[in-house]
Amino acid sequence: MTENIKQGDFLPEFHITGGAGWINDPNGLVYYKGEYHVFFQYHPYGTAWGPMHWGHVVSKDLTSWRYLPIALTPGGVGDKDGCFSGTAICAFQKLYLMYTGFEENGGGEAVRQVQCLAESEDGVTFKKLGVVIGSDDLPADFMPCDFRDPHVFEKDGTFYCLVAAKKVGGKGRLLLYRSKDLKRWSFFSDALGFDSDGVMFECPNYVDSLGLLMVSDQLPAPKEDGCLNVHSTRYFIGKMDFTVGRFIVENQGVLDYGFDFYAPQSFADCKDSIAIGWLNMWDRNVPSVKYGFAGMLTVPRRLSVVDGKLKQEPVVMKREVFKTAVERSLTDEVMTGVIEIRAEKLKNFELKLRCGDGNYTLIKLVDGAIEFDRSKSGEAIVGVEKDELSLSGKRKMPFTRQDKTTFTIVLDKYSVELFDGTFVMSSTIYPPKTAIGLELTVNADSCVYTRYDVIK
Ligand code: FRU
Protein backbone atom coordinates (compact mmCIF):
# COMPACT_ATOMS: atom_id res chain seq x y z
CA MET A 1 0.00 0.00 0.00
CA THR A 2 1.42 3.42 -0.85
CA GLU A 3 1.23 6.14 1.73
CA ASN A 4 -0.79 9.13 0.64
CA ILE A 5 1.75 11.92 1.14
CA LYS A 6 0.38 15.46 1.14
CA GLN A 7 2.71 18.47 1.00
CA GLY A 8 0.86 19.75 4.07
CA ASP A 9 2.13 16.77 6.08
CA PHE A 10 5.55 18.37 5.92
CA LEU A 11 4.52 21.89 6.87
CA PRO A 12 4.80 23.09 10.47
CA GLU A 13 1.61 22.53 12.44
CA PHE A 14 1.00 26.10 13.59
CA HIS A 15 3.84 28.31 12.38
CA ILE A 16 3.22 30.59 9.41
CA THR A 17 5.02 29.58 6.20
CA GLY A 18 4.41 30.52 2.59
CA GLY A 19 2.83 27.06 2.06
CA ALA A 20 5.23 26.72 -0.86
CA GLY A 21 8.17 28.92 -1.77
CA TRP A 22 10.51 31.13 0.22
CA ILE A 23 9.60 33.59 2.98
CA ASN A 24 11.59 36.00 5.10
CA ASP A 25 10.58 39.03 7.21
CA PRO A 26 7.09 39.47 8.62
CA ASN A 27 5.54 42.64 7.15
CA GLY A 28 2.54 44.87 7.72
CA LEU A 29 1.36 43.31 11.00
CA VAL A 30 -1.98 44.94 11.78
CA TYR A 31 -5.30 44.29 13.52
CA TYR A 32 -7.90 45.32 10.97
CA LYS A 33 -11.68 44.76 10.97
CA GLY A 34 -11.57 42.07 13.68
CA GLU A 35 -8.68 40.03 12.28
CA TYR A 36 -4.92 39.90 12.72
CA HIS A 37 -3.23 40.39 9.36
CA VAL A 38 0.28 39.16 8.76
CA PHE A 39 2.08 39.82 5.49
CA PHE A 40 5.53 38.47 4.75
CA GLN A 41 8.39 38.71 2.27
CA TYR A 42 7.51 35.98 -0.18
CA HIS A 43 8.97 34.39 -3.29
CA PRO A 44 6.17 32.11 -4.46
CA TYR A 45 8.07 30.60 -7.39
CA GLY A 46 11.10 29.13 -5.67
CA THR A 47 12.58 28.04 -2.36
CA ALA A 48 15.35 30.66 -2.51
CA TRP A 49 15.03 34.44 -2.07
CA GLY A 50 13.87 36.05 -5.33
CA PRO A 51 11.63 38.88 -6.54
CA MET A 52 9.83 39.80 -3.35
CA HIS A 53 6.05 39.70 -3.14
CA TRP A 54 3.96 40.23 -0.02
CA GLY A 55 2.26 36.99 1.06
CA HIS A 56 -0.76 37.40 3.33
CA VAL A 57 -2.47 35.40 6.09
CA VAL A 58 -5.16 36.33 8.61
CA SER A 59 -6.30 34.97 11.95
CA LYS A 60 -8.85 35.67 14.62
CA ASP A 61 -6.92 33.95 17.41
CA LEU A 62 -3.24 34.36 16.44
CA THR A 63 -2.86 30.59 16.16
CA SER A 64 -4.90 29.37 13.23
CA TRP A 65 -4.02 31.21 10.01
CA ARG A 66 -5.92 31.42 6.72
CA TYR A 67 -4.20 32.28 3.45
CA LEU A 68 -5.35 35.27 1.42
CA PRO A 69 -4.18 36.15 -2.10
CA ILE A 70 -0.75 37.71 -2.55
CA ALA A 71 -1.14 41.35 -1.54
CA LEU A 72 1.73 42.99 -3.43
CA THR A 73 3.46 41.82 -6.61
CA PRO A 74 6.57 43.57 -7.95
CA GLY A 75 6.40 45.33 -11.30
CA GLY A 76 4.91 48.76 -10.56
CA VAL A 77 6.35 52.25 -10.34
CA GLY A 78 9.45 52.11 -8.14
CA ASP A 79 9.08 48.41 -7.34
CA LYS A 80 10.02 46.79 -10.67
CA ASP A 81 12.18 44.13 -9.01
CA GLY A 82 10.67 43.68 -5.58
CA CYS A 83 8.29 44.80 -2.86
CA PHE A 84 10.59 44.78 0.16
CA SER A 85 9.69 44.95 3.85
CA GLY A 86 7.38 47.48 5.42
CA THR A 87 4.50 48.03 7.79
CA ALA A 88 0.75 48.75 7.84
CA ILE A 89 -1.52 51.35 9.37
CA CYS A 90 -5.28 51.90 9.51
CA ALA A 91 -6.18 55.48 8.59
CA PHE A 92 -9.02 57.31 6.89
CA GLN A 93 -11.14 54.11 7.14
CA LYS A 94 -8.64 52.25 4.97
CA LEU A 95 -5.73 49.88 5.41
CA TYR A 96 -2.43 51.28 4.12
CA LEU A 97 0.78 49.37 3.46
CA MET A 98 4.05 51.24 3.30
CA TYR A 99 6.89 49.22 1.80
CA THR A 100 10.19 49.54 -0.02
CA GLY A 101 10.14 49.44 -3.79
CA PHE A 102 13.30 47.81 -5.09
CA GLU A 103 14.89 48.33 -8.50
CA GLU A 104 18.10 46.47 -9.18
CA ASN A 105 19.48 48.44 -12.16
CA GLY A 106 22.49 46.09 -12.45
CA GLY A 107 23.26 46.08 -8.71
CA GLY A 108 25.72 47.90 -6.43
CA GLU A 109 25.22 51.65 -6.05
CA ALA A 110 22.86 51.70 -9.04
CA VAL A 111 20.22 49.92 -6.90
CA ARG A 112 17.29 52.15 -5.97
CA GLN A 113 15.21 51.65 -2.82
CA VAL A 114 12.24 53.97 -2.36
CA GLN A 115 9.24 53.98 -0.05
CA CYS A 116 5.89 53.17 -1.63
CA LEU A 117 2.28 53.22 -0.45
CA ALA A 118 -0.66 50.91 -1.18
CA GLU A 119 -4.24 51.08 0.08
CA SER A 120 -7.15 48.71 0.59
CA GLU A 121 -10.72 48.97 1.78
CA ASP A 122 -11.40 45.27 2.26
CA GLY A 123 -7.96 44.28 3.60
CA VAL A 124 -7.60 41.75 0.78
CA THR A 125 -6.91 43.58 -2.47
CA PHE A 126 -4.45 46.45 -2.54
CA LYS A 127 -4.11 49.35 -4.92
CA LYS A 128 -0.59 50.73 -5.33
CA LEU A 129 -0.32 54.51 -4.93
CA GLY A 130 3.32 54.75 -6.02
CA VAL A 131 6.45 56.23 -4.46
CA VAL A 132 5.85 58.54 -1.48
CA ILE A 133 9.40 58.87 -0.11
CA GLY A 134 11.93 58.81 -2.94
CA SER A 135 15.68 59.17 -3.35
CA ASP A 136 15.29 62.97 -3.48
CA ASP A 137 13.87 62.93 0.04
CA LEU A 138 17.12 61.55 1.43
CA PRO A 139 19.55 63.93 3.12
CA ALA A 140 22.55 64.48 0.81
CA ASP A 141 24.97 62.30 2.79
CA PHE A 142 22.83 59.14 2.51
CA MET A 143 22.86 56.44 -0.18
CA PRO A 144 19.74 55.85 -2.33
CA CYS A 145 20.76 52.19 -2.80
CA ASP A 146 20.37 51.34 0.91
CA PHE A 147 17.17 52.99 2.06
CA ARG A 148 14.49 50.61 3.21
CA ASP A 149 11.94 49.02 5.55
CA PRO A 150 9.59 51.92 6.41
CA HIS A 151 7.85 51.70 9.76
CA VAL A 152 4.80 53.94 9.77
CA PHE A 153 2.93 55.00 12.92
CA GLU A 154 0.70 57.79 14.12
CA LYS A 155 1.18 60.09 17.11
CA ASP A 156 -1.13 62.98 18.07
CA GLY A 157 -2.53 63.41 14.57
CA THR A 158 0.79 63.23 12.71
CA PHE A 159 2.07 60.22 10.80
CA TYR A 160 5.71 59.30 11.29
CA CYS A 161 7.84 56.94 9.28
CA LEU A 162 11.17 55.47 10.39
CA VAL A 163 13.32 54.25 7.53
CA ALA A 164 16.69 52.47 7.67
CA ALA A 165 19.32 54.28 5.62
CA LYS A 166 23.06 54.20 5.09
CA LYS A 167 25.47 57.13 5.25
CA VAL A 168 27.78 57.64 2.31
CA GLY A 169 30.94 55.77 3.29
CA GLY A 170 29.40 54.97 6.67
CA LYS A 171 26.96 52.73 8.47
CA GLY A 172 23.26 52.43 9.15
CA ARG A 173 21.07 55.17 10.66
CA LEU A 174 17.32 55.46 11.25
CA LEU A 175 15.72 58.43 9.51
CA LEU A 176 12.39 59.86 10.64
CA TYR A 177 9.87 61.42 8.23
CA ARG A 178 6.58 63.21 8.95
CA SER A 179 3.29 63.51 7.10
CA LYS A 180 -0.32 64.58 7.63
CA ASP A 181 -1.85 62.43 4.89
CA LEU A 182 0.55 59.45 4.36
CA LYS A 183 1.21 60.71 0.83
CA ARG A 184 3.35 63.83 1.23
CA TRP A 185 6.31 63.29 3.54
CA SER A 186 9.10 65.53 4.73
CA PHE A 187 12.38 64.61 6.37
CA PHE A 188 12.36 65.29 10.12
CA SER A 189 15.42 63.83 11.85
CA ASP A 190 18.13 61.26 12.34
CA ALA A 191 16.11 59.43 14.99
CA LEU A 192 18.80 57.52 16.89
CA GLY A 193 21.75 59.77 16.20
CA PHE A 194 24.23 56.89 16.21
CA ASP A 195 25.41 54.20 13.82
CA SER A 196 24.40 50.59 13.47
CA ASP A 197 26.92 48.13 14.94
CA GLY A 198 27.06 46.30 11.64
CA VAL A 199 27.01 47.66 8.10
CA MET A 200 23.34 48.66 8.01
CA PHE A 201 20.17 48.79 10.09
CA GLU A 202 17.08 46.94 8.82
CA CYS A 203 13.41 46.70 9.77
CA PRO A 204 12.99 49.29 12.56
CA ASN A 205 9.84 48.96 14.64
CA TYR A 206 8.77 51.42 17.31
CA VAL A 207 6.17 50.57 19.98
CA ASP A 208 5.18 53.93 21.45
CA SER A 209 3.18 52.52 24.40
CA LEU A 210 6.27 50.65 25.64
CA GLY A 211 8.96 53.16 24.65
CA LEU A 212 10.46 50.27 22.69
CA LEU A 213 12.45 50.37 19.49
CA MET A 214 13.38 47.08 17.84
CA VAL A 215 15.91 47.12 15.05
CA SER A 216 17.83 44.53 13.09
CA ASP A 217 21.48 44.95 12.28
CA GLN A 218 23.38 43.49 9.30
CA LEU A 219 26.74 41.85 9.99
CA PRO A 220 27.46 43.16 13.52
CA ALA A 221 30.74 41.96 15.03
CA PRO A 222 30.03 38.61 16.73
CA LYS A 223 29.60 38.87 20.52
CA GLU A 224 29.21 35.85 22.75
CA ASP A 225 26.52 37.56 24.84
CA GLY A 226 23.92 37.18 22.14
CA CYS A 227 24.98 38.50 18.74
CA LEU A 228 26.56 35.44 17.21
CA ASN A 229 24.26 35.21 14.22
CA VAL A 230 25.44 36.80 11.00
CA HIS A 231 22.61 39.33 11.44
CA SER A 232 21.03 40.14 14.76
CA THR A 233 18.16 42.09 16.34
CA ARG A 234 18.50 44.48 19.25
CA TYR A 235 16.00 46.44 21.23
CA PHE A 236 16.28 49.87 22.80
CA ILE A 237 14.07 51.12 25.60
CA GLY A 238 13.69 54.82 26.10
CA LYS A 239 11.64 57.80 24.99
CA MET A 240 10.95 59.32 21.63
CA ASP A 241 11.16 63.10 21.93
CA PHE A 242 8.72 64.13 19.22
CA THR A 243 9.66 67.80 19.47
CA VAL A 244 13.06 67.06 17.91
CA GLY A 245 12.50 63.56 16.53
CA ARG A 246 15.13 61.85 18.67
CA PHE A 247 14.84 58.55 20.53
CA ILE A 248 16.68 58.76 23.84
CA VAL A 249 18.03 55.33 24.76
CA GLU A 250 17.82 54.32 28.41
CA ASN A 251 18.42 50.61 28.12
CA GLN A 252 19.11 48.00 25.48
CA GLY A 253 19.26 44.28 24.97
CA VAL A 254 19.12 41.33 22.63
CA LEU A 255 15.66 40.29 21.46
CA ASP A 256 16.32 36.60 20.99
CA TYR A 257 19.33 34.44 21.80
CA GLY A 258 18.58 31.60 19.39
CA PHE A 259 19.97 30.70 15.99
CA ASP A 260 16.97 31.79 13.96
CA PHE A 261 15.40 35.13 14.64
CA TYR A 262 15.35 38.36 12.64
CA ALA A 263 13.32 41.37 11.55
CA PRO A 264 10.53 41.31 14.18
CA GLN A 265 7.67 43.74 14.13
CA SER A 266 4.61 44.39 16.28
CA PHE A 267 0.93 44.59 15.36
CA ALA A 268 -0.32 48.06 14.56
CA ASP A 269 -3.76 49.18 15.78
CA CYS A 270 -3.83 46.43 18.38
CA LYS A 271 -4.51 47.03 22.07
CA ASP A 272 -1.75 44.60 23.11
CA SER A 273 1.88 44.80 22.03
CA ILE A 274 2.36 41.57 20.14
CA ALA A 275 5.30 40.86 17.85
CA ILE A 276 6.32 38.22 15.32
CA GLY A 277 9.79 37.65 13.85
CA TRP A 278 11.30 35.63 11.04
CA LEU A 279 12.23 32.19 12.43
CA ASN A 280 15.20 31.70 10.19
CA MET A 281 18.52 33.34 9.33
CA TRP A 282 20.25 34.54 6.20
CA ASP A 283 23.13 32.62 4.68
CA ARG A 284 22.27 29.12 5.88
CA ASN A 285 20.88 26.04 4.17
CA VAL A 286 17.20 25.37 4.92
CA PRO A 287 16.59 21.60 5.01
CA SER A 288 12.85 21.98 4.30
CA VAL A 289 13.49 23.07 0.69
CA LYS A 290 13.01 19.44 -0.25
CA TYR A 291 9.39 19.76 0.95
CA GLY A 292 8.93 22.80 -1.29
CA PHE A 293 9.10 25.54 1.34
CA ALA A 294 11.77 27.60 3.12
CA GLY A 295 11.30 29.91 6.05
CA MET A 296 8.65 30.42 8.69
CA LEU A 297 7.62 33.01 11.23
CA THR A 298 7.83 32.76 15.02
CA VAL A 299 4.72 32.35 17.12
CA PRO A 300 3.37 35.72 18.26
CA ARG A 301 4.88 37.05 21.49
CA ARG A 302 3.29 39.46 23.93
CA LEU A 303 5.74 42.22 24.81
CA SER A 304 5.93 44.21 28.00
CA VAL A 305 8.55 46.34 29.68
CA VAL A 306 9.17 45.71 33.38
CA ASP A 307 11.81 47.67 35.29
CA GLY A 308 13.26 48.93 32.02
CA LYS A 309 13.66 45.43 30.61
CA LEU A 310 11.78 43.73 27.80
CA LYS A 311 9.69 40.67 28.69
CA GLN A 312 8.21 38.34 26.10
CA GLU A 313 5.68 35.53 26.42
CA PRO A 314 4.28 33.29 23.68
CA VAL A 315 0.71 33.70 22.47
CA VAL A 316 -0.76 30.38 21.30
CA MET A 317 -4.17 28.81 21.84
CA LYS A 318 -3.50 25.68 23.85
CA ARG A 319 -5.23 22.91 25.82
CA GLU A 320 -3.65 21.11 28.77
CA VAL A 321 -3.32 17.37 28.07
CA PHE A 322 -0.89 16.11 30.70
CA LYS A 323 0.37 17.43 34.02
CA THR A 324 2.56 15.80 36.62
CA ALA A 325 4.94 16.58 39.45
CA VAL A 326 8.54 15.64 38.66
CA GLU A 327 10.72 14.15 41.40
CA ARG A 328 14.00 13.97 39.53
CA SER A 329 13.26 12.86 36.02
CA LEU A 330 10.49 12.27 33.53
CA THR A 331 10.06 10.89 30.03
CA ASP A 332 7.31 11.83 27.60
CA GLU A 333 6.57 11.87 23.90
CA VAL A 334 5.89 15.07 22.00
CA MET A 335 6.54 16.39 18.54
CA THR A 336 4.42 19.55 18.55
CA GLY A 337 2.75 21.51 21.35
CA VAL A 338 3.74 23.58 24.35
CA ILE A 339 5.74 22.29 27.32
CA GLU A 340 5.76 24.19 30.59
CA ILE A 341 8.21 23.44 33.39
CA ARG A 342 7.61 25.24 36.67
CA ALA A 343 10.27 24.81 39.31
CA GLU A 344 10.92 26.18 42.77
CA LYS A 345 14.53 26.84 43.72
CA LEU A 346 15.87 25.34 40.52
CA LYS A 347 19.44 24.09 40.92
CA ASN A 348 19.92 22.07 37.80
CA PHE A 349 18.02 21.24 34.68
CA GLU A 350 18.49 19.24 31.49
CA LEU A 351 15.90 18.69 28.81
CA LYS A 352 16.26 16.54 25.72
CA LEU A 353 13.66 17.07 23.02
CA ARG A 354 12.90 15.22 19.80
CA CYS A 355 14.91 12.16 20.90
CA GLY A 356 15.03 9.11 18.66
CA ASP A 357 17.45 7.17 16.44
CA GLY A 358 20.46 8.96 17.92
CA ASN A 359 18.96 12.43 17.46
CA TYR A 360 18.13 14.87 20.23
CA THR A 361 18.02 18.60 20.94
CA LEU A 362 19.51 19.57 24.27
CA ILE A 363 18.64 22.45 26.58
CA LYS A 364 20.54 22.61 29.86
CA LEU A 365 21.75 24.88 32.58
CA VAL A 366 25.55 25.36 32.37
CA ASP A 367 27.46 27.84 34.51
CA GLY A 368 24.47 30.07 35.11
CA ALA A 369 23.39 30.18 31.45
CA ILE A 370 20.92 28.19 29.39
CA GLU A 371 22.68 26.30 26.66
CA PHE A 372 20.84 25.15 23.55
CA ASP A 373 22.54 22.47 21.48
CA ARG A 374 21.26 21.41 18.07
CA SER A 375 24.38 19.54 16.95
CA LYS A 376 22.45 16.24 17.14
CA SER A 377 19.09 17.63 16.05
CA GLY A 378 18.87 15.83 12.71
CA GLU A 379 19.73 17.41 9.39
CA ALA A 380 22.73 19.73 9.53
CA ILE A 381 22.24 23.45 9.21
CA VAL A 382 25.42 25.17 8.08
CA GLY A 383 25.86 28.93 8.21
CA VAL A 384 28.65 31.43 7.65
CA GLU A 385 29.32 31.97 11.38
CA LYS A 386 32.79 30.78 12.33
CA ASP A 387 32.89 31.23 16.13
CA GLU A 388 33.30 28.19 18.35
CA LEU A 389 29.73 28.07 19.68
CA SER A 390 28.17 28.32 16.23
CA LEU A 391 30.46 25.65 14.83
CA SER A 392 29.50 23.32 17.68
CA GLY A 393 25.77 23.91 17.08
CA LYS A 394 25.22 25.87 20.30
CA ARG A 395 23.67 29.07 21.55
CA LYS A 396 23.58 30.51 25.08
CA MET A 397 21.04 32.64 26.88
CA PRO A 398 21.51 34.35 30.26
CA PHE A 399 19.65 32.80 33.19
CA THR A 400 18.91 34.47 36.49
CA ARG A 401 18.31 32.18 39.44
CA GLN A 402 15.08 33.05 41.20
CA ASP A 403 12.81 31.34 43.71
CA LYS A 404 10.39 30.41 40.95
CA THR A 405 11.35 29.57 37.37
CA THR A 406 8.99 28.86 34.48
CA PHE A 407 10.24 27.61 31.16
CA THR A 408 7.73 27.62 28.32
CA ILE A 409 8.81 25.74 25.23
CA VAL A 410 6.86 26.05 22.01
CA LEU A 411 7.60 23.02 19.85
CA ASP A 412 6.65 22.58 16.23
CA LYS A 413 7.95 20.08 13.67
CA TYR A 414 11.00 22.18 12.84
CA SER A 415 11.38 24.65 15.68
CA VAL A 416 11.99 25.20 19.38
CA GLU A 417 11.14 28.55 21.00
CA LEU A 418 12.21 28.71 24.65
CA PHE A 419 10.85 31.44 26.94
CA ASP A 420 11.91 31.84 30.55
CA GLY A 421 9.73 34.85 31.33
CA THR A 422 12.51 37.32 30.47
CA PHE A 423 14.69 35.95 27.70
CA VAL A 424 13.84 34.01 24.57
CA MET A 425 15.74 31.68 22.33
CA SER A 426 14.33 30.53 18.98
CA SER A 427 15.90 28.00 16.66
CA THR A 428 14.98 25.68 13.86
CA ILE A 429 15.73 21.94 14.00
CA TYR A 430 15.16 19.23 11.38
CA PRO A 431 15.02 15.84 13.16
CA PRO A 432 13.26 12.81 11.64
CA LYS A 433 9.51 12.51 12.17
CA THR A 434 10.08 9.46 14.38
CA ALA A 435 12.14 11.43 16.92
CA ILE A 436 9.50 12.40 19.47
CA GLY A 437 11.03 11.38 22.82
CA LEU A 438 11.41 13.87 25.66
CA GLU A 439 13.67 13.37 28.68
CA LEU A 440 13.73 15.80 31.58
CA THR A 441 16.11 15.73 34.54
CA VAL A 442 15.67 18.35 37.19
CA ASN A 443 17.10 19.23 40.57
CA ALA A 444 14.77 21.65 42.36
CA ASP A 445 12.72 21.92 45.57
CA SER A 446 9.67 21.09 43.45
CA CYS A 447 8.85 20.83 39.77
CA VAL A 448 5.65 20.53 37.74
CA TYR A 449 5.64 19.49 34.11
CA THR A 450 2.66 20.35 31.89
CA ARG A 451 2.13 19.45 28.25
CA TYR A 452 -0.39 21.29 26.07
CA ASP A 453 -1.70 20.65 22.58
CA VAL A 454 -2.00 23.67 20.35
CA ILE A 455 -5.63 24.21 19.34
CA LYS A 456 -6.25 25.15 15.74
C1 FRU B 1 15.72 41.93 6.05
C2 FRU B 1 15.66 42.38 4.60
C3 FRU B 1 15.08 43.78 4.52
C4 FRU B 1 14.54 43.82 3.12
C5 FRU B 1 14.05 42.41 2.93
C6 FRU B 1 14.19 41.90 1.52
O1 FRU B 1 15.73 40.55 6.22
O2 FRU B 1 16.96 42.33 4.05
O3 FRU B 1 15.98 44.80 4.82
O4 FRU B 1 13.51 44.75 2.99
O5 FRU B 1 14.80 41.60 3.80
O6 FRU B 1 13.56 40.67 1.37
Image (cartoon, helix red, strand yellow):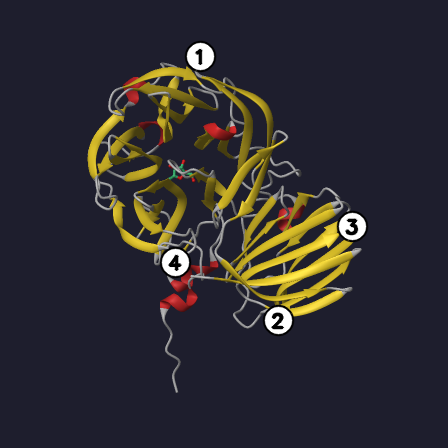
Seen at 24% across and 41% down, the residue is 74
Q: Kindly identify the amino acid type of the residue bearing the numbered disc 4.
A: Phe
**Label located before the other in sequence (2 or 1):** 1
Task: Write down the residue under mark 1.
Answer: 244
* Separation (CA) of disc 3 from disc 2: 31 Å
Instruction: Give ligand 1's quarter of the image.
Output: top left
Please, what is the three-letter code of the amino acid marked with disc 1?
Val
In this rendering, does residue 404 appear at all? yes
Residue at disc 2, CB closer than 8 Å to ligand 1: no
Above or below, comparing residue 69 to residue 132 in the picture: below
Image coordinates of residue 371 in percent, x first then y, are 68, 50
Q: Where does label 4 land, which residue? A: 293
Residue hosting label 3: 345
Give the quadrant of the N terminus: bottom left
Circle nearer the N terminus (1, 3)? 1
Element on which disc 3 rests:
loop
- Residue 440 rendering spot, x and y as whole percentages: 70, 63
Query: Between tags 1 and 4, which lies in front?
Result: 1
> Which sits in the foreground, 81 or 405?
405
Q: Secondary structure at mark 2?
A: strand
Q: Position of residue 102 (x, y in %)?
A: 30, 34
Q: Is residue 100 above or below residue 389?
A: above
Residue 356, labelled with which disc?
2
